Image (cartoon, rainbow, N blue to C red):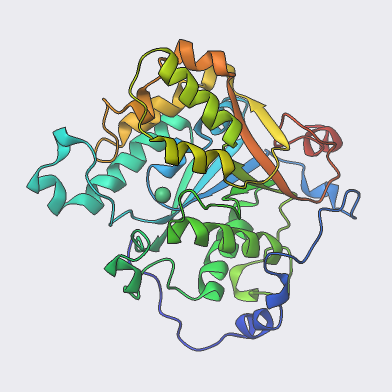
Amino acid sequence: MGGPATAGGTTAGQQQWAGRQQWSGAGEPAAPGRALCWGAVTEQLCLLSVHAHPDDESSKGAPTVAKYHSEGVRCVLVCCTGGEEGDILNPAMDRPDVADNLTEIRARELERASRVIGYDEVVMLGYRDSGMPGSPANQDPASFARAPLEEVTERLVEVIRRTKPHVMVVYPAHQSTYPHPDHVRVHEVGLAAFLAAGDAEVFPAAGPPWRPLKLYYTLRSSKRWLAWAEKLKEIGRELPWDDERLEMIAKAPHEQVTTEVEVGAWAHVRQEALRAHETQVDPKSSFWFGLPPEVEAELGQVDEYHLAFDRCGSALPEDDLFAAIREKAAL
Ligand SMILES: [Zn+2]
């Protein structure tokens, strides 16, 4: 995977980028009907998901990816870090030989999980895990959260321009219940790269411009979390949260759910992929595996998303990440 390239001098693209900081987070509104080059959507549809650590691709939106992969959509995963700071959370794997080789082991776990989910390509962005907020790893210069925004954005833009996704999925702005620095960074970098990739004047060395059509935030609404907790109690399983945590989840702000993807037959993929991360996931954990699949199905088999940017005028609410793209491109 290697460490991130050092910022060796300022390229022309970075200078232009510097003048465009006002884009980040606000710039282009979600404007239906913007002029588009529909001719670009003539080949296989492509979905690009950006995640922070190995195992995030399994816990967030894995059934959605499995579903689209089965329908012939090319699915690309960008994993920003190697997860070097992850604790061994499965007692059966808490051994010195595992701890000493955690980076390599997590890379193999990611490979297995990606095959279970159906990713066609996995790109390691090459940064180091920044650790939980306040931990010494935050200060490591190789860490994802410390790398300059321009440098990381250019790296992601390069992947976008090469793989040509029509839809991108990143993390939401609201992450108050789990403010891991790398997760916060995925939001910032994902948004910046989505906006920059289609602009030929920005990062010219990163390849010819490509404009992804929609940007989504993967999320889980408080309503769904609370329904899940209620169900756990109902079947007599131990709830991994106290009342204080439950109240925090209930009050946590999150983006509006604009899109519910029915994952049906693919719902089981989440737990299956999580099991591939055997250092990170305790198979006895009620958090990950407390609800048997048939009980979980009673809560509705959907993955939730917020449509943050839309360059093709999809009508909301929607149930397909490719809504409006599929129809207009007749794919
Ligand atoms: Zn993570």
Q: Is residue 53 above or below residue 279?
A: below
Residue at the farthest front position = 243
Name the residue located 51 percent from the left edge and 62 percent from the top edge.
Answer: 185
Name the residue located 13 percent from the left edge and 53 percent from the top edge.
Answer: 100
Location of residue 16 by image quarter: bottom right
Q: Position of residue 145 (x, y in %)?
A: 44, 67
Q: Is residue 226 above or below residue 197?
A: above
Q: Position of residue 84 (x, y in %)?
A: 28, 56
**Residue 47 versus residue 102: which sits nearer the camera?**
102
Position of residue 229 in the picture relative to residue 197 (left or right): left
Q: Is any part of residue 209 visible from this angle? A: no
Q: Position of residue 135 (x, y in %)?
A: 30, 65
Q: Is any part of residue 115 visible from this angle? A: yes
Position of residue 195 in the picture relative to residue 274 (left or right): right
Q: Position of residue 119 (x, y in %)?
A: 49, 38
Q: Is residue 113 above or below residue 194?
A: above
